[in-house]
Structure formats: structure tokens, C-alpha cells
Image: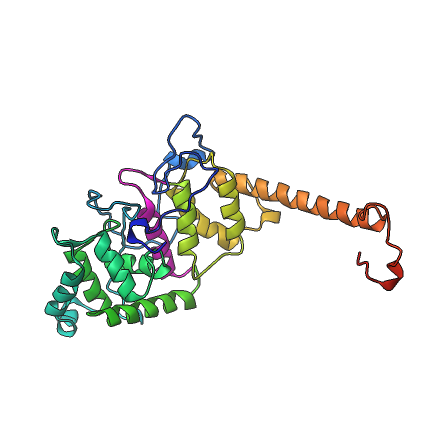
Amino acid sequence: MGSCLTCFKAPPNPTAGNVGVCGGAVSGPDAAVIDPDVAVHETDDLLAASPIRMISLGSDRKSGGSFKKTLLNGNLGALPDGSTVTGKDLATQISDNDLNKLFEEYKDSQEDAILSEGIERLCCDLGYKPDDFAILVLAWRLDASQMCQFTKSEFIQGLQQMNAASIDDIKTRLRQIIDKLSATSDESEDFKQLYRFTFRFGLEPGHRILSLDMAVSLWRLVFTVHTPDILPRWLNFLEQHQNIRGVPKDTWNMFLNFVETCDITQYDDTEAWPSLFDDFVEYEQERMKAVAAAAMAANSSKSDGTGDGGGPDEDDNNNDYNS
């Protein structure tokens, strides 16, 4: 996806029925909820606490596409090297005039904000596609309140906190932040903050759960630098079960704990995991049994000579037949 109008748009799924690819819950009478945790006990306590600020949802002005979700973040005072910079120190390092000029290059002609076309040009100048991991990181560090929009205060204050006053500066800071995220584990506080942010990033205004397609797309995106071994199987399970209406915050948060501690062969369904995890483990255990049975049947077929449709060939002595 190279267009800002399709930023973070979940890929079309032919089995998904009327699922909205831009986020939100499935509509229609066939939508059923596998996970009963959808509407209860939402909390951030499952991950290490961080000062994340709730921002009211704005209107989708000129968004035109799926780049219209909610963005939050805290702890913006930390620089990529781990140090912090006060507002007074930043004022001496970065000229407001430089930041204003940079903002003017991308702002909308009618509104005092950078909207979809400006964000697309900004991504292009930075050398990234709008759906690259780096742009998720940029939105996180700018503390943007809405997809497809950087307000003037978000853009200027966010770049002040990043200590960046030019495109080259932003490129450098993004590389530093991504390198730091890559060098640390998925248990680090920085990654956990980004992970929490990503859930809110995908929410439709007024919704409390991620649509299934959006959740799958964002899990792929946020785990760009730390990809759990179990992730492909988890996403395959979700894509095979389109009757899952959505992913609530508890399920999203606990998945990070799940990938760190879960052993499918030793899974204890009496622990306090979301029921969607129970369904996934049961699905995987049955799948692995079927794979093992098929492998045994294939080996048995080869050993008794029935696998070739009637026995070994006449030139078997040439050792071309591999059992």
C-alpha cells in the first residue's frame, strides 16, 4: 500500500463477508462472538504501567480512507538514547521557526493541520510507505490523536520532543528509535508502550474493540521488530475463524504475555487466559494431531509399497527411490 488513503488498511479477505477493512465490528446477522471477554474487564494492568493519556476522538476530516483511527502515547520526553530533555532545553536546541516552516510544507491548504495528502508526501520524503513500521513509530512519538491527521501542536511539540527540525533529523531519530526497539526484547517498557498504543491506533471512533481484520493487520505491523514464533499460527487461526467479531483490549494486552509464556503442549486452560486463547490452543492441538496422523499414514504407505500406486519400480536397485 503506497497511498496514505490506504494507510494501515487490512488486506481484503474473501472469507470475511462484510467485514469493514477500515476497522470496526462486523455488521450483519451472521456476526457471532467467540470471545465472551469482548465487553468486560478492560484494563492496562496486564502490562507494565505507563502514563498514557486518553485523548477524545475527533472527526474524520478529509480522511477519505482507513487512516482514521485513534492514536495515543505518553512518555514522549525520552530521547532514543534513553535520556530526557526538558522543554527549556529543547527550546534552545530547536527553532520554532524551523518547525513552523516544516509544518507549512505539509499542511492542508484549508485547515491548520497535516491531512492525508500531506502525510502521504511526508512519508514519501522520509523514504517510507505509509504502512511501514517506521510510520507507526512516528505517529506514536508525535502523540497523534487521529489517523490521517497531524495537528500543528502535535507535529511541532512531537518533533520538539524528538529533537528533530528537518526531514533528515526525523529520519535519524526514527532509525535510532527503531534500532533501540530492535535491540531490546518485547518485554521492554518502550515496546510495551508502543504495543498498547497500537491497539488504540486501530480503534474506530466510539468503539472499544478492534475489528478482526484490523487486529490481524496491526499484529503483523507492531511485531515487525519482534516476531514471536507463534504469530503466524495465531494469525492463521484468526483468519480461519471469521465469526470472531473483534478483539477487545484485554485480549490484545494479554497476547503479549501469552507469546512470552505459552507452551501449547503444556497449556493449562484453567488459568485466567481469555477464552479466545483456549480456542486457539484447542485448534492448534487438533491441527498438530492431524498433521502427525497424516505423516504416519504416509510413512506406512511408503513402507508397504502402496504409496506409489502398486509397488516399487523395476529400476529400484538404482537407489532412486527414497522412502
- Locate the N terminus and report the quarter of the image it occupies: bottom left
Instruction: State yes or no: residue 100 in magenta.
Output: no
Q: Where 55 sits versus 318, above or below?
A: above
How many numbered circles does the render carry?
0
Instruction: State yes or no: residue 207 in magenta.
Output: yes
Q: Foreground residue, 236 or 19?
A: 19
Report the colour scheme. Answer: rainbow
From this viewpoint, is residue 75 visible? no
Q: Foreground residue, 80 or 28?
A: 28
Residue 313 horizontal side relative to residue 85, left or right: right
- Give the farthest residue toward the top: 29
Q: Residue at x 37, y 34 (%)?
A: 39
- Give the farthest residue toward the front: 314
Specify the segment rendered in magenta. Answer: 187-210
- Locate the C terminus and report the quarter of the image it occupies: bottom right
Q: Measuring from the top left, give residue 271's x and y in whole percent.
A: 52, 42
Q: Where 261 sits versus 294, above or below?
A: below
Q: Residue at x 50, y 56 (%)?
A: 228
Q: Residue at x 86, y 49 (%)?
A: 311
Q: Measuring from the top left, give residue 10's x and y in whole percent.
A: 39, 46
Q: Measuring from the top left, give residue 220's x and y in whole percent.
A: 43, 53
Q: Measuring from the top left, give residue 156's x and y in whole percent.
A: 17, 62
Residue 23 horizontal side relative to residue 259, left or right: left
Q: Foreground residue, 142 or 101?
A: 101
Q: Quadrant of residue 294?
A: top right
Q: Residue at x 87, y 58 (%)?
A: 316
